[in-house]
Each structure stands twice: as C-alpha cells, then as structure tokens.
Amino acid sequence: CLDRKEISFIYDKEFTGKERKKNEKPLHLVNHDNAWYLVVANLEVNQDHKIRSVARMSNLKTHVITFSEIKFSIDKFMEYNFGIFTGKKSHKVRVRFDAFAAPYIRERKWNSSQKIKNFKDGSLEFSITVNDLVEIKGWIMNWGKHAKVLGPKHLVDEVKNELKVTLEKYG
C-alpha cells in the first residue's frame, strides 16, 4: 500500500462464487476479527472505496505501475463501521442489555458515536450510529435473551423475523 503499486488478482465474489479479475489501487490493509481485508481505491465519481477480503484473492500480482497519491484516512473511512462492513446510510441503533450482558457491553468501544445509559437494575441502553446493519444485527442476536433492539424499527422487524424463522426450524 505504501509504495502505491497497482495490483491485480482473481477475486471470488461473495455469495455468487463467481471469479473475476480485478485491477486495483491498494490503500490500506485491515485486520478485523482475525481476517485480513484490503481497502482499494474506487475513483469513479461519487463512489466510496471498496473493501476486499484477502482470503478470496488468488493469483495476486504487484505491477510496476505506480499511482498518484490518494488522500485517504482509514479512521475517517471506518468512522461509523460496527465491523468491517461499510454502507452509505446512517442508522441510529438502540439496544437494551440486561444486567448479565451490561458489564461486557461497557468494556468495549466500537466507534466514537456510541453512548451508554445505565439503569439502577444493572441493565443499560446502548446507542450507536452505524453505516451498515449486517454485523450489528448478528452481534445483537448473539446476545440472545440478554438483548432487546429498541430501534430503528426496521432493525427490530428484521430481528423479529430472524427469530421467527429460526424457531420454525426447530418445529
């Protein structure tokens, strides 16, 4: 990334299994949850940079071609991420955690927007602004009976639906 050399690789697209050749300008290498991701430049008008999973890359080649410096801040790019997923829409998420989960929620910082409101019974309300709901939904559901989504409404509905479908699998 630092030497600004263009790279090419075969990329296995998630969910489709289709491989495509990519020519990219690497900006930053990120480790998230023990997996490596590469942030690459997207220089098309009004397009955000993209994140590529290193595990889905093959036949990686570094080229002699260098590219002009691109102003980029990883902190700014991931400012409202909950994990590695990025999106364009802002979501204000609110979750009530019981006294069992509360100590674990207090001890971690996901991004600078998060706030915690403590209650006398030991529970808390966690609020955070994120730009994608995929990872935070999975995280909330991981807490099971110890968490309840308060907002936004479409996230409440998604969690209810996931739980309903899951229960149906158990008859």
Image (spheres, rainbow, N blue to C red):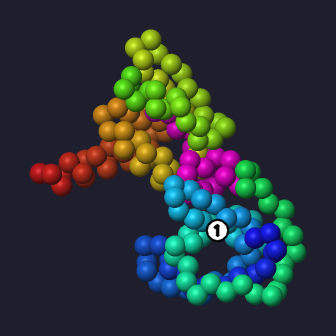
Whether residue 95 appears in magenta in the rendering, the answer is yes
- Most extreme residue toward the top is 120
- Give amino acid for label 1: Leu
Q: Is residue 76 above or below residue 156?
A: below
Q: Is residue 101 above or below residue 161?
A: above
Q: Nearer the viewer, residue 92 or 67?
A: 67
Q: Look at mark 1 in the image and give the residue it sits on.
A: 38
Residue 86, horizontal then vertical, whole percent: 60, 57
Q: Which residues are magenta?
A: 77-96
Q: Secondary structure at mark 1?
A: strand
Residue 148, horizontal then vertical, whole percent: 38, 33
Q: Nearer the viewer, residue 17 or 87?
A: 17
- Most extreme residue toward the left is 171
Identify the residue at horizontal 63%, vertical 55% (top origin): 88
Relative to 139, 54 lies left or right:
right
Assign the N terminus to one quadrant of the image.
bottom right
Identify the residue at horizontal 55%, vertical 83% (top origin): 58
Whether residue 17 appears in magenta in the rendering, the answer is no
